[in-house]
Image: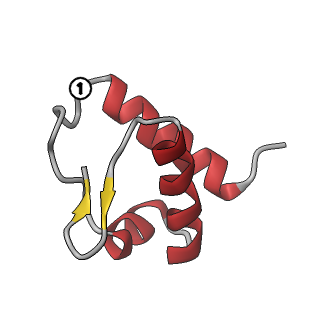
Amino acid sequence: MSTAYQLVADSLRSAIQNGDWAPGDRLPGEMELARIHAVSRNTIRQALSQLESSNLVRRQQGHGTF
């Protein structure tokens, strides 16, 4: 059984791999992603952390996720 953050991470991974965001593009903010996926901001943070640890995204405090 997948957790909420895993489902969000999988969705974002698919969108990135399908070319919805080009390399270097800024992803929507945590609040916007939380609204889109109907989950908490903490869930979004966990999903983004997982993607960052697999080097799929880069997070810069105060600037966003790329």
Q: Is residue 27 left or right of residue 43?
A: left
Q: Nearer the viewer, residue 25 or 55?
A: 55
What residue do we see at 48% from left, 40% from top?
11
Q: Residues within 10 Å of mark 1 (few under 14, many from 20)?
A: few
| Amino acid type shown at disc 1 | Gly
Rendered location of residue 15, percent (x, y): 35, 34
Q: Percent x, y for residue 23?
A: 18, 33
Q: Secondary structure at mark 1?
A: loop
- Measured along the vertical axis of the image, is residue 51 above or below residue 62? above
Out of 20 and 62, give the one closest to the viewer.
Answer: 62
Q: Going 33% across and 49% down the picture, which residue do you hit?
A: 58
Q: Quadrant of the N terminus?
A: top right
Position of 54 relative to 19 (above/below) = below
Residue situated in front as seen by the camera: 55 or 36: 55
Question: Looking at the image, which is closer to me, 39 or 25?
Answer: 25
Q: Quadrant of residue 60?
A: bottom left
Colouring used for the render: secondary structure
The residue identified by callout 1 is: 19
Residue positioned 37% across, 64% down in the render: 33
**Place of residue 41 in the rendered image (x, y in percent of width and height, measured from the top left):** 50, 76
In this rendering, position of residue 38 left or right of residue 58? right
Spot occupied by residue 55 in the image (x, y as percentages of width and height): 43, 36
